[in-house]
Image: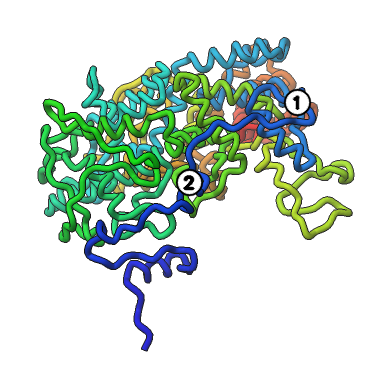
Amino acid sequence: MKAWPPLPLLLLVLLTGSVATAKPIHASLDPVKDEPPISAEDRQFWAFKPLQRPDLPALKHPEAARDEIDRFILAKLEAAGLSLSPPADPATLIRRVTFDLTGLPPVNEEVQLFIKSPTDKAYEAYVDKLLASTQYGERAAQHWLDLARFAETDGFEYDAERKHAYKYRDWVIEALNKDLPFDQFVRQQIAGDEMSPPETMATGFLVSGPDMPDINRQDERRHVVLNDITSTFGSAFLGVTIGCAQCHDHPYDPLSQTDFYRLRAFFDNATEMKLGKQLAPGFVEAGATAPASHVVIRGDFHRPGPEVSPAFPRIANPEAKAVAAAPLAASTGRRLALAQWLTQPTNGLFLRASVNRFWQHHFNKALAGIPNDLGHQGEAPTHPELLDWLATELPRRGWSMKAMHKLIVMSATYRQGSAECAVPGAQSGQILRTGHSAPGTSTSEPAPDSSALYAHFPRRRLSGEELRDAMLFVSGRLNSKPGGAGVHLPLPPEITITLPKKKQTEATDPRELDRRSIYVFARRNLRHPLFELFDKPDALMSCGRRNESTTAPQALMLFNSEFSLGTAQAVAAQVMPGDSDSTSVVTRATWRCCSRAPTAKELALGKAFLERQTALTSTLDEAVTDYCLALINASAFVYVD
């Protein structure tokens, strides 16, 4: 009779359907002694190679490039017989970059000013203005809070409120607005309490995950929390799924179970957890002397294994640097040593993971497609040389995040139009699609993917937070007050009846209800319906890339909700004063909702709609409200070109 495989391997088969590419999982009770070595082949994988600055590629048409980014993009396009799309029109570009850098629509007067003089100098000045605005930090912080699995409650059954969690969110926004150098930004989140001057609130990153203070076994709670911190560190800062090595050696990547627990040892000196007491809003150590750290056999907290010392993951530490922690008065200094090692300008894995996220923020897709997994189960970068060039450029620019963002949005690649390009040699009007060939070409070779090669700007849908903020903005109701405790928005009755009375809180000041979505109270077990429908992550684990679904309830929410109707009524009131002929109303409403003038077709359709709807409702006011409701449901409002 054939023997069953070990249980973890069996689970792997059930989850993946195959073990053909998986590494053997060690069954030994001594993971340290049986730890597999890092091979030369392991180090040849693209993400684990030493970081080197690539040369700029030669181009047939160098005049098409505005900067170094364009040279790498154009080299791939020219090899495929393609080129960049024509530049986006001025109104489209300004709307794009404003949403991109602030998460809000542009002010119409600034759009009109740029349309009159769409020069490079004017565009650069506008980008600088956006980067200097407080809205920049509020926009950029949302990406980081996804990564930090930030919420203002514990999660699990009781989902108790964390009264001071918002202070970490506010620290992130402030740090981004100050353009805190990225290496310092990261170091403070790992070991801010061990630095001078101390920045304890920054370490809220480590303890932002879910927790169960009321669990009877506090040793189990401690094990789960420390494993979450370690896993999140690996995903967020190294772009590897080291959490897969909690119970056994990683099945695909050169990360052993011992690697995992050596990394966890940096955090093992966390202060004692007490029954019913929530974690502090920042990481707190128990003193200058750390307890012994152990591998946990099969990830079972009942089974401590061999003792280990803190060490950097071997695959990310090719020079085999040792940990040199200097104990401090109230802590071991271990996390500071970890933070300093991580943020070296030679740490290729950290830098690749970081700039990969910067690129994703602007193009809605990363150069290496799964930002939290650069390992063998992730996606290889479409432009590896560009990724490495950006990774070496970040330290050269003083670790300035704003400088990197400006570099990207100033490129011709970013400033091109979103229309898909034509297939070389194809008939007029035929566009390039992934996996399809032009007429008359061989079908044995798929046509190049114009989207993956950035032959046009990738259109994207607004996130739930951006949608809500944009609706508040166009209605003239957006409250720009910064910081403070999360705002409790009203919830529909079908949701509130499921909540205990103590959790049915709502802001008492009506103006508070109109604050930006970054300041909406982030409950782990219950996302606001608009955010949930539009794919806000659940904050149970680090999210490097949001899903982007298209469902019927999204349209029903935008068209039928009380919030949408209120927005439409407010926009209608804004566009009705003065000259109220249908041409003026359609023009003003389109400018307000879409940041541009209506096309001739849109103008004709809008006027016809108002005429029919006025006849049905008997009042122009109602007809204009209905038209504005249609506008905020239009693709021109919901999507960014």
Q: Quick check: 374 above or below 340?
A: below
Q: Quick check: 270 above or below 43?
A: above
Q: Position of residue 636 (x, y in %)?
A: 65, 32
Residue type indicated by callout 2: Leu
Please give left or right for residue 490 compared with residue 295 in the image: right
> Which of the two labelled residues, at mark 2 and mark 1, occupies the earlier sequence position?
1
Residue type indicated by callout 1: Pro
Distance in Å between CA atoms under marks 2 and 1:
31 Å
Q: Element under label 2? A: loop
Q: Position of residue 356 (x, y in %)?
A: 51, 36
The answer to whether one can see residue 535 in this image is: no
Residue 85 sits in quarter: top right
Looking at the rendering, in which quadrant would you find the C terminus?
top right
Which residue is at 44% across, 17% downward?
Answer: 134
Q: Position of residue 207 (x, y in %)?
A: 26, 38
Task: Verify CB contact (< 8 Å) between mark 2 and mark 1.
Answer: no
Pointer 2 residue: 374
Q: Quick check: 216 above or below 386?
A: below
Which residue is at 17% across, 39% downward?
Answer: 270
Please give left or right for residue 195 compared with residue 217 in the image: right
Which residue is at 16% across, 39% downward?
Answer: 269
Q: Which mark is residue 184?
A: none
Q: Element under label 1? A: helix
Say which of marks 2 and 1 sits in front: 1
Pointer 1 residue: 62
